[in-house]
Every structure is written in structure tokens, then in C-alpha cells.
Amino acid sequence: MPNSDELTIDESTLEELTKLKNGAGYEKRTWDEWFNFAFNLESSTAQSTLEKVMEKLHYESFDEWVQNFAINLNQIWNESSARVLDPLQSSTTHNEEHSAIVIGSGPSIKKHNHLELIAKSDYKGSIICGDGSLTSALQAGITPDKFPKFYVLTIDPLERQRKLYDNDLVNKYGGKINGIFSTVIHPSAVSRAREAGIKIHWVHPLFDYGEGKKSFNQISALMARAKNHKDGLPAIQIGGNVGTAAWFVGWQILRCTVIALVGINHGWEEDDPWEKIISHGRTADPKMYGNDISVSVDKSDPSFEKLFRKIYNPEFNCYSIVDPLYQFYSNALKEFIIRSPKWLTTVNATEGGSIFGERIKCMRLRQFLDDYKK
Amino acid sequence: MKANFNIKKNDILSNLKNQTTPEHKELTQEEFEEFIVKSGAKGSFMVYRSPKKEDELGLDSL
């Protein structure tokens, strides 16, 4: 009779498990550690902790975001819903394969010259830039003249996002760019995009919809419907950051069947400067973030290993250093990719970082551009 | 051929071991919050959670 305290498996199963364990970089670690990693046993609890903190911090800015919405409301009434970008609105052909490349500003984008690679390609699909990568994409030659299905997305409601649109290249190409903006974005940021000629399209960012009719999501939606938008606006999961939101836009608004990620590392390269890593990249961009960053980390501190995890990416045979914010982003995006419909393929062409695993097809960007033309 | 996995009980000894290997423990709420505030990352968006799980993936129209 089997002993309930004993797990017995075939030797062939053990061999397969050993291959998977070693392949994930767990060769010298215990089986218990690998099981926790492989089946995500620890991170679901850990992610819940991280999400509680982010929710608390989110609500510290709640008043400002309500004010942003109030100031934006007249423009929301007079400008387009992001739903007009949905190809299903004007076509009944649901099944045609079409792809998008989501461009983030993670460290691999420079390391692998990904922007230049895209710029020189004959890719015909959609380009979705997070606002932080807009200027560098245009500078590299990824322009709406060459890639007419060109989109930029801003989610972050802070005033500093304005700087991302305050650029001559944005002025030059703005008239050919479709912008997708959260209804709580800072008014001066969307105003600057509007000045550059970017066509504004609005989406609601989901954060408290489930709290019922008195939630801000539901009240602001009723206000937006009060004039012109009688069918409302699409509401998207942000996932904590613009990169994940851009992936949702590719799926839920543009209805792409394939979405490739570049510059979506959700982690740091091993050779990135520590000052940059411990500040979540903010010290590397004082123009955007100022000089008031006070984080300092003692590498001998017991919490160091927990704060900055070094993980092995078996898909690209490299390591990534994942800070706490990237742990939060990465866990969420991987969860949503697993939950996405089977007709949607997510390709990670970042060539590094922490986004790999179930339902994520990893390949070199060059390979993606060869395989997916439209 | 079969292979056996021995189950290690979560007893006092293993709990003590965990306490002396902090690198294997998860971030606490306080540690994470401190990092977020000090790094200037405050203002980032939360992840939307709902009892209706399908709503977490977005709404066509709100």
C-alpha cells in the first residue's frame, strides 16, 4: 500500500524533470527550490504582497488623478474613443493574422540594436511604442512614414510625461501618429501631444471598477458617456506599467493575433551600473526624474538578495537582475499572458530579461521579423 | 526503476533554517514599500483585481 508521506516517480520522469531543472539554471539548487520556481508556488503569495503595496501607493495619488480626469473631460467628450482603432469596428474578417511590435525602453533595446533592426526591416504590422520609447524609436528611423500603423501609449498620470512629447521629431511626425491616452493622464502631457498633432484616443484605466457603482471607474465612465461617447470607452488592465498596457492594447484594441515584445525586459542586464539598478533606472535620466532619488543599498545587507534577484533566462541563455518593481511587473504580465486567449501568440523578442515561460514564444528579433511580415 | 522523493516536514528545525537563509524568503511588504518610495517609483499604476476574473482582462466598453 502506498505510503502517503512518499512520492514515487518513474526514473524516466525524474530524468525529464532533471533536464528541466538544469535548463532553468537550478542545477546546483534543491528540488524544493525548483518546484517552487517551476510551479510559481511562492510568487503568487509574494505577488499579492507587492500588489497590496502598489494599491496603497496608487491611492496616495488618487486626488490628483481625479483632478486630471476632471480637466480632461471636455477633451474626452470631443475626441475619439480608442475603440475606433479596433479593426472589428469596420470589418467582419476576424481571423486574419496580423501582428504588432510593442517597443519598451528596457536595457536590451540598445544592447541588441533592436530599434535599428526594426527601422531597416520591411515589417508591415503595427508598432506600439510606450511613451518612454517614442523619441528613441523616431530617432532610429521607426517613423509613421515607414510604418503607417504607428501608435503611442501614455498611462502614467504624472506631469513629467509631458517631456516625452516635447521633441522636434514628435512635432514632425505627430500628425501621423495615433495616440492612446488614459483618461487620468496629466492634462499638460496630453496637451503637448495634441500640440504635436498626435490624434488622441481615450481609454479608461481599470483600478476600482469592481467596487461597484460608486467606484471612480464607474462614475468617470458615466461622465464620459454623458456627451458623445454614449457607448462608453474601452477599459484596459494596466498591469502596473505602460509596457504591459501596450500588450493589452495590441490584444484588446488592435485585435492583433501576434504581439512581439522588444525592450520589455522587466529586469536589468548584469552589466548595467548598480546605481541605475538600485534606482530602477531613474538616476540614468535626471532630466526626466530629477535628482531627488535617495535609494541606497548595502550589498552585504541580508535583504539585498531579496530586493535584487538574479534569475537565469534559459530561452536566451542569460541572467537578469530583477528589482522589486520589476518582480511586480513581470509576475503580472506573465500571469496575463497565460490567461490570454489561445488565438493570441505572445512573442518575446527582447532577447533578455525576465519574461519567459508558459505561452511565451521566445525568439531573436531578427527571426521574428523574418517570420512575421504583417 | 523508481525514484523516491522524501518529504521534509515543516518542523521547528526547518523553520529555524529558513530564518538563517533570508535570501530564500520573499520580500516583505515593508521592504518593497521602502524600495518603491526611495527609488522614486511612487506613482506607478496598480494591477486591477476583481472577484470577476474575466474583468481583470479589460472591458470592451465602460
Image (cartoon, rainbow, N blue to C red):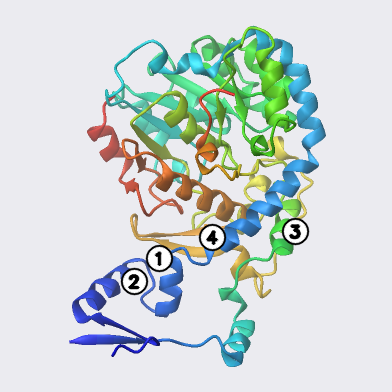
Return the residue at label 1. Answer: A38
Residue positioned 68% across, 53% down in the render: A52
Residue positioned 42% across, 31% down in the render: A251
For the residues labelled 2 and 4, the Cα–Cα distance comes to: 20 Å
- Tell me: residue A3, above or below residue A309: below
Between disc 1 and disc 3, the foreground one is 1
| Residues at marks 1 and 2 on the same chain | yes
Residue A156: image x %, image y %? 66, 33
Residue A75: image x %, image y %? 69, 11
Between disc 4 and disc 3, the foreground one is 4
For the residues labelled 4 and 1, the Cα–Cα distance comes to: 12 Å
Return the residue at label 4. Answer: A44
Q: Nearer the N terminus, badge 1 or badge 2?
A: 2
Q: Which mark is residue B34?
A: 3
Q: Nearer the N terminus, badge 2 or badge 4?
A: 2
Structural crowding at the residue carrying mark 2, measured as other residues with C-alpha within 10 Å and reported as few (<14), some (14–19) or many (≥20): many
Q: Which mark is residue A21?
A: 2
| Residues at marks 4 and 3 on the same chain | no
Between disc 4 and disc 1, the foreground one is 4
For the residues labelled 4 and 3, the Cα–Cα distance comes to: 21 Å
For the residues labelled 1 and 2, the Cα–Cα distance comes to: 8 Å
Between disc 2 and disc 4, the foreground one is 4
For the residues labelled 1 and 3, the Cα–Cα distance comes to: 29 Å
Q: Secondary structure at mark 2?
A: helix
Residue positioned 55% across, 42% down in the render: B52
Q: Name the subunit of mark 1.
A: A
- Tell me: residue A58, above or below residue A115: below
Q: Secondary structure at mark 3?
A: helix
